[in-house]
Image: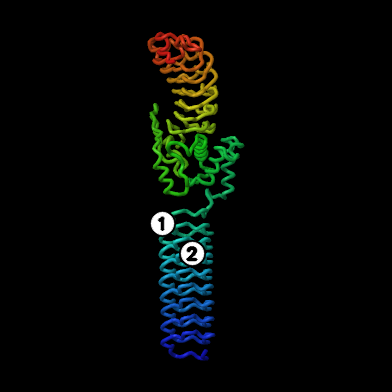
């Protein structure tokens, strides 16, 4: 090359570049670029950039950037970025990004984002965000956040969160959240939260069931810890209640109910909205006491408060579960013992499903229970003795199951009982004399069992024809019934259905 460059550039560039660049660059660039780039870049950049960039970049970048950027970007990026960024960005980004980012960001961001992110993020973010977000996020986040957030979020989240969060939040949230959150939940590490919650729940469920993979208890625990977007904390007095309702869901075939099944993606707002729209169960049955409650029809396990899940109602004052009400909604599985911890539960209504197993004796601890209605299921075993000690039980409706055993003499303790339906089971023995103590009893149905003997006279005395309240009394009192209960119609029984 010439030892000194021409004072004016050629109006037409050389068809072949020099083997080596000039030691000093031209004062003005050529009006058109060379057909082929120089093998080595100039030691110093031109004072003004070319109006049209080279079709291929130099094999190595300039040691310093141009004072002003090119009007149009190169079709292909440099293999290595400049050690210093341009003072002003190009009006349009490169079609393809550089393989490695600049060591320092530009003072002013590009007007348009790159179509694909850099494979490695910048060590420091730009002082201002891009006017438009990248179409795809970087595979790794910046080490520090931007001082000012983007006006619009990326269409997809970063695979990992920033080490430190942005000072200000984005004006609009991302369409999808990051796969890992920036902050730990509840101001504690993930492991500490797991330990605290698990330790408490070991006092609610059998520890073996809680920690055994595949059980309803373990599935509920893992959902609460890993997937529940409600992010309840171990110091929240209602986190046990939320866990118990999750156990109920998994114990009774949740996922195959007729309605109100959990969303398939707990972090997708669209999927959650679709699941909520498919739920129309309201726990709004009659309450003899008229207490105000909170109800909803959200899908189960959705990130709302459990009081708003379809089929549940909570006390308006305490947000304790007040009512569980399902009738012919395809529930199956078994009734979990954990419901015995819902001390405010007054209505347990799970009818017309395929729920099997036994009635947990722990339900006898629910001293506020007004109604137990579990008819038309597949329950087995005997009626727990503890049930007969419920102080304000109005209705015990267990007909059309496979219950066995006898009716305890303790049934006389249910002094406020108004309806007792035990028909179509496999109960044996005799009808207890203590049933005559039930002064408020209006309906007593016992047919379709294997009971025998005679209806106690004290029960017959409760009939409405004797100025009592009992206006419906049935048993296997037909002469063809085997076994047979001696109960004359209409003097005592109102009907002998079978």
Q: Nearer the viewer, mark 1 or mark 2?
A: 2
The residue at the point 39 percent across, 37 percent down is 280
Badge 2 is on which residue? 117
Q: Is residue 194 left or right of residue 497?
A: right
Residue 319 appears in view: yes
Q: Residue 47 appears in which quarter of the rendering?
A: bottom left
**Which percent across, then down, holds residue 148?**
44, 63
Residue most extreme to the front:
15
The residue at the point 52 percent across, 13 percent down is 430
Badge 1 is on which residue? 172
Q: What element does badge 1 sit on? A: loop
Of mark 1 and mark 2, the one earlier in the sequence is 2
Residue most extreme to the right:
208
Residue 317 appears in view: no
The residue at the point 47 percent across, 17 percent down is 448
Q: Is residue 356 above or below residue 308?
A: above
Residue contact at pointers 1 and 2, CB within 8 angstroms: no
Q: Is residue 424 above or below residue 33?
A: above
Q: Residues within 10 Å of mark 1 (few under 14, many from 20)?
A: few
**Which percent across, then down, holds residue 461?**
43, 10
Q: Quadrant of the C terminus?
A: top left
Q: Is residue 423 above or below residue 73?
A: above
**Which percent across, then down, holds residue 346?**
45, 29
Q: Is residue 467 above or below residue 46?
A: above
Q: Which mark is residue 276?
A: none
Front residue of 395/60: it is 60
Front residue of 395/90: it is 90
Q: Residues within 10 Å of mark 2 (few under 14, many from 20)?
A: many
């Amino acid at each position: 090359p010439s030892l000194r460059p021409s004072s004016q550039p050629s109006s037409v560039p050389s068809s072949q570049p020099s083997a080596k660049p000039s030691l000093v660059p031209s004062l003005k660039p050529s009006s058109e670029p060379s057909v082929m780039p120089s093998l080595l870049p100039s030691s110093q950049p031109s004072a003004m950039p070319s109006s049209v960039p080279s079709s291929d970049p130099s094999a190595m970048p300039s040691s310093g950037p141009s004072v002003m950027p090119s009007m149009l970007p190169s079709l292909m990026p440099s293999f290595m970025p400049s050690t210093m960024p341009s003072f002003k960005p190009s009006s349009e980004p490169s079609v393809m990004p550089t393989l490695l980012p600049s060591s320092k960001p530009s003072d002013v961001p590009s007007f348009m984002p790159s179509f694909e992110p850099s494979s490695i993020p910048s060590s420091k973010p730009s002082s201002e965000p891009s006017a438009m977000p990248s179409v795809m996020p970087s595979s790794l986040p910046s080490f520090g956040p931007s001082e000012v957030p983007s006006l619009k979020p990326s269409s997809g989240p970063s695979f990992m969160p920033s080490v430190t969060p942005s000072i200000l939040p984005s004006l609009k949230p991302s369409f999808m959240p990051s796969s890992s959150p920036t902050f730990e939940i509840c101001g504690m590490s993930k492991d500490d939260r797991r330990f605290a919650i698990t330790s408490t729940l070991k006092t609610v469920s059998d520890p073996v069931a809680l920690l055994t993979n595949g059980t309803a208890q373990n599935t509920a625990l893992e959902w609460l810890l890993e997937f529940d977007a409600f992010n309840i904390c171990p110091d929240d007095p209602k986190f046990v209640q939320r866990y118990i309702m999750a156990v109920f869901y998994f114990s009774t075939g949740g996922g195959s109910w007729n309605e109100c099944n959990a969303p398939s993606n707990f972090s997708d707002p669209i999927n959650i909205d679709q699941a909520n729209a498919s739920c129309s169960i309201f726990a709004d049955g009659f309450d003899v006491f008229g207490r105000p409650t909170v109800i909803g029809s959200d899908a189960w396990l959705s990130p709302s408060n459990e009081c708003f899940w379809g089929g549940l109602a909570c006390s308006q004052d305490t947000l304790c579960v007040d009512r569980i009400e399902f009738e012919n909604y395809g529930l199956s599985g078994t009734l979990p013992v954990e419901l015995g911890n819902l001390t405010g539960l007054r209505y347990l209504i799970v009818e017309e499903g395929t729920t099997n197993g036994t009635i947990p004796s722990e339900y006898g601890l629910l001293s506020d229970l007004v109604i137990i209605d579990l008819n038309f299921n597949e329950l087995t075993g005997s009626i727990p003795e503890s049930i007969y000690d419920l102080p304000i039980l109005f209705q015990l409706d267990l007909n059309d199951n496979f219950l066995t055993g006898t009716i305890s003499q303790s049934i006389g303790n249910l002094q406020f009982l108004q309806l007792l339906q035990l028909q179509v089971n496999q109960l044996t023995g005799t009808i207890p004399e203590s049933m005559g103590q039930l002064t408020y009893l209006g309906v007593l149905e016992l047919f379709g069992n294997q009971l025998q003997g005679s209806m106690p006279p004290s029960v017959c005395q409760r009939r409405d024809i004797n100025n009592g309240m009992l206006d419906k009394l049935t048993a296997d009192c037909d002469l063809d019934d085997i076994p047979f209960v001696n109960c004359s119609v209409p003097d005592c029984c109102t009907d002998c259905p079978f």
